[in-house]
Image (cartoon, rainbow, N blue to C red):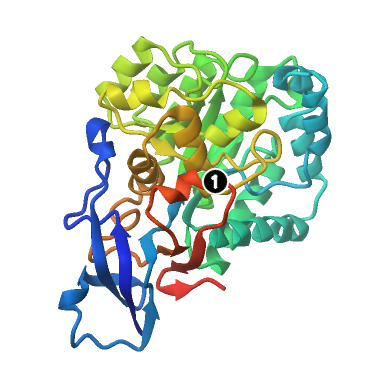
Amino acid sequence: MTTLIANIKELLQVRDSNVSIVKGKDMKILPTLKNAYLLIDDDTIVQYGSMTECNGIEADTTIDANGKIVLPTWCDSHTHIVYAGNREQEFVDRINGLSYEEIANRGGGILNSAEKLQNISEEDLYSQSAKRLEQVMKQGTGAIEIKSGYGLTIEAELKMLRVIKRLKQHYNLKIRATLLAAHAVPKEYKNNKNGFVDLIINKMIPEVANKELAKYIDVFCEKGYFDLEDTDRILESGLKYGLIPKIHVNQFNAFGGVGMGVKHHALSVDHLEELNDEDIDVLRNSDTIPVALPSCSYFLSIPYTPARKIIDSGLPLALATDYNPGSTPSGNMNFVLSTACIKMKMTPEEAINAATINGAYAMGISHRYGSITKGKKANLIITKEVPSYNFLPYAFGDNHIDRVIINGQLIS
């Protein structure tokens, strides 16, 4: 099955060679091709070029993209979309003056979601999560990472990971699974955090690895949750079982968590709303990519990740949604793109690079996703008729997507 997209106003993120990550000043460069065509064979990009070179190309299906922009689908490297219910009351509590920490300390937050998840059937959990996944696909996400972490018991964490595995089997997009058992300390371990860390290390990690239910291991390294010693132990154990480290860090406090992630060769360090010069220095000498989650900052009214400091220091940056019920109840990467430009002073070129090729790197899949490159997967957004790609983050309240193609197939 071949598909030809013709008369493309502008084809974005065109990379002749297989670039896997974009850093520093290079993030301001977004290679494009105007008046272009793109040819798909089955699920793969096989050719693209100027419309002047398109004569004689035949395809089973032709899509006319006159006046429209084509770009890679978003690669969302940080989500928690497998969860039960919602936490809308906590939203109201924050409006009435309670902080995220205060809500958590009185049994809300992650513990609230854990209780809901422990009491829901696996079938209902799958049904709720599938609807969210379908929605983000329509919004242009073509690859996604999904974390556990709302179970906090062995069985509930395994239930979440089984649901993620089922989503992978039933939906035509790339899904990476992450074990985030160290998301919060359960009530029954309130006075025995070390006991819970021991449970993660001795029981959860071996079982998850044995069942091949996760690719990554993650920890919420933050004051009041898991400290540096806890994080060190958990990531080290995960590595022994072949789980690649990722880490929630510097959301509210900067106390060495970035360095801990780099020590363990973490693929990414995520959040970074608080960041100091020491963190910048340690990232410079690593292959670890910083990931910003601007929707979380918007929803919680906390500082935004200092994107300018990160990029201007020569580092790469990825953007993701943090889709979850408590701090970011949205998986809309288009809003993330706009918020990064408006609140973090990223240029549209930087934001698109961060949400495509660098997002793919933060998931370990940039060899097949994140750019318009021959041999990569045909995961594409076709916009509506727009003046330029600058219009995408500029007109933040509108839906600019006409069609989404994932693995060569149109998403209805």
Left/right of residue 331 with respect to residue 19 in the rendered view: right
Q: Quadrant of residue 303?
A: top right
41 lies above or below 203: below
Left or right of 288, for residue 208: right
Image position of 306 with respect to 270: above or below: above
Quadrant of the rendering where the C terminus is positioned: bottom right
Where's residue 167, x and y in %? 59, 61
Q: Amino acid at mark 1?
A: Phe
Of 116 and 405, nearer the camera is 405
Asked whether residue 331 is in view, the answer is: yes
Q: How dense is the environment of label 1, judged by Cα within 10 Å: few (below 14), some, or many (20 and up)?
A: some
Dividing the picture into quadrants, the one containing residue 129 is bottom right
Q: Residue at x 41, y 20 (%)?
A: 258
Residue 58 falls in image quadrant: bottom left
Q: Which residue is mark 1?
A: 396
Q: Residue at x 34, y 65 (%)?
A: 377
> From what the image shows, is residue 359 above or below residue 7?
above
- At x 31% / y 74%, what residue is drawn? 7
Q: Is 62 left or right of 325, judged from the image as shown?
A: left
Secondary structure beneath dot 1 equals: loop
Towards the viewer: 224 or 54:
54
The answer to whether any part of residue 76 appears in the image is no
Farthest residue, direction front: 387
Question: How far across and down, in percent of the image, does residue 403 sit?
Answer: 49, 68
Query: Image quadrant for the N terminus?
Result: bottom left
Tag count: 1
x, y percentage for residue 42? 35, 78
Percent position of residue 314, x then y: 25, 26
